[in-house]
Image (tube, rainbow, N blue to C red):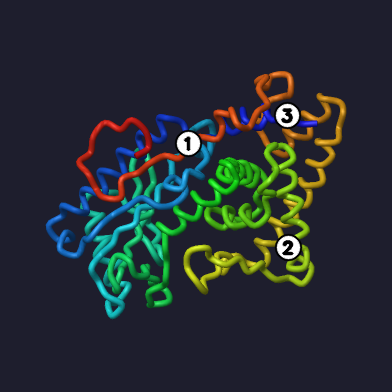
């Protein structure tokens, strides 16, 4: 037993708050304008745009640690006029030096980005190049590999929107449910972020319109689809939907995959028991073990219709170009 209303209420609860979206919006607008106007950086600056889970509307509320809410994590792409012949370390150093004039930076030197921290948000700023023009392939630098790697953040956003449309708006809520589940049961750092999105896209039943069975069915499909990988000790090779030849799970270790798989199997079995349980209180106990903060059956809203749910939050819109900071009405 499990009701649509329980899952709708949980989705509302795990959504980033209006305050989180507002402060994050202000922070990323300010940083983008700073880079566009900087006297040493504006000569190499072409464009900036938002990427990542906030842009794709697949983010969930920040963690609560010791009673305090963590900061949102925002991804910002900075397009420069450098070429493939430019040393990736040089580009990352310039970006780090420029950002360091205004912002506090992470002590850790990232391989592909510059980490910025403010009182309101943490931002991962990624420089890219488009050597064949705006309509050509994009590349990001890798300090460790000393090369440029293909990427397509706008393509990822378009892909997520298309999958969501193809599933009548259920894909992004399902991603949020799986992210929420994984947050509370993760035994390793990966998979996360876009890896989770591609796993959900591969494993969710695109015709099921009821969240309880859709959630459990997704976990069960993970278990069945990747069972051979688990048994032989390999990682599923999930193709990047927007970068031909790229594998999304390339940086997922066998050990991390096994830990993820084991949790999926454990909770797929428990979730199926919860669906079959006739006693509402017993079913509630099972659901709360799988998905912390899910409301009890009795406290959930009466409406069960997916088509009228407010949990499937409309996609947020974001400017692709830096603009003058202003009071935001949402995360835009």
Q: Is residue 45 above or below residue 69?
A: below
Q: Measuring from the top left, give residue 56's x and y in whole percent.
A: 46, 48
Q: Secondary structure at mark 2?
A: loop
Disc 2 crowd, CA 10 A, few/some/many (<14, 14-19, 20+): some
Residue most extreme to the left: 39
Between residues 48 and 102, which one lies in front from this camera angle?
Answer: 48
Mark 2 = which residue? Answer: 226
* Residue found 71% across the figure and 49% down from its top: 218
Tag 2–tag 3 contact (CB < 8 Å)? no
Q: Which mark is residue 93?
A: none
Between residues 136 and 152, which one lies in front from this camera angle?
Answer: 136
Mark 1 = which residue? Answer: 314
* CA distance for labels 1 and 2: 32 Å
Q: Measuring from the top left, give residue 70's x and y in whole percent.
A: 47, 39
First of labels 1, 2 by sequence position: 2
Tag 1–tag 3 contact (CB < 8 Å)? no
Mark 3 = which residue? Answer: 3
* CA distance for labels 1 and 3: 22 Å
* Residue found 41% across the figure and 67% down from its top: 111
* Residue found 23% across the figure and 34% down from its top: 326
Disc 1 crowd, CA 10 A, few/some/many (<14, 14-19, 20+): few
Residue 221 placement, left or right of 244: right
């Amino acid at each position: 037993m499990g009701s649509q209303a329980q899952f709708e209420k949980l989705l509302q609860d795990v959504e980033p708050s209006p305050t989180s979206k507002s402060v994050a919006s202000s922070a990323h607008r300010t940083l983008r304008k700073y880079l566009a106007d900087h006297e040493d950086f504006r000569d190499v600056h072409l464009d900036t745009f938002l990427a990542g889970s906030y842009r794709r509307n697949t983010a969930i509320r920040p963690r609560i640690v010791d009673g305090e809410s963590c900061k949102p994590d925002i991804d910002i792409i900075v397009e420069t006029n450098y070429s493939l012949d430019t040393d990736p370390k040089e580009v990352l150093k310039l970006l780090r030096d420029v950002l360091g004039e205004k912002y506090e930076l992470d002590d850790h030197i990232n391989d592909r980005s510059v980490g910025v921290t403010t009182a309101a948000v943490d931002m991962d700023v990624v420089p890219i190049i488009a050597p064949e023009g705006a309509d050509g392939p994009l590349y990001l630098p890798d300090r460790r590999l000393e090369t440029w790697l293909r990427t397509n953040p706008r393509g990822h956003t378009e892909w997520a929107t298309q999958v969501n449309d193809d599933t009548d708006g259920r894909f992004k809520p399902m991603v949020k449910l799986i992210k929420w589940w994984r947050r509370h049961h993760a035994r390793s750092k990966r998979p996360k972020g876009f890896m989770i999105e591609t796993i959900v896209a591969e494993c969710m039943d695109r015709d099921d319109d009821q969240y309880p069975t859709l959630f459990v069915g997704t976990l069960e499909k993970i278990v069945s689809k990747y069972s051979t990988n688990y048994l032989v000790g390999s990682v599923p090779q999930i193709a990047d939907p927007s970068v031909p030849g790229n594998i999304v799970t390339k940086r997922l270790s066998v050990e991390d995959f096994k830990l993820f798989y084991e949790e999926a199997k454990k909770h797929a079995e428990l979730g199926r028991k919860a669906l079959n349980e006739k006693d509402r209180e017993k079913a509630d106990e099972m659901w709360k073990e799988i998905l912390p903060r899910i409301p009890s059956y009795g406290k959930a809203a009466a409406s069960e219709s997916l088509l009228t749910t407010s949990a499937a939050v409309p996609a947020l819109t974001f400017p692709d170009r830096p603009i003058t900071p202003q009071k935001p009405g949402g995360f835009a």
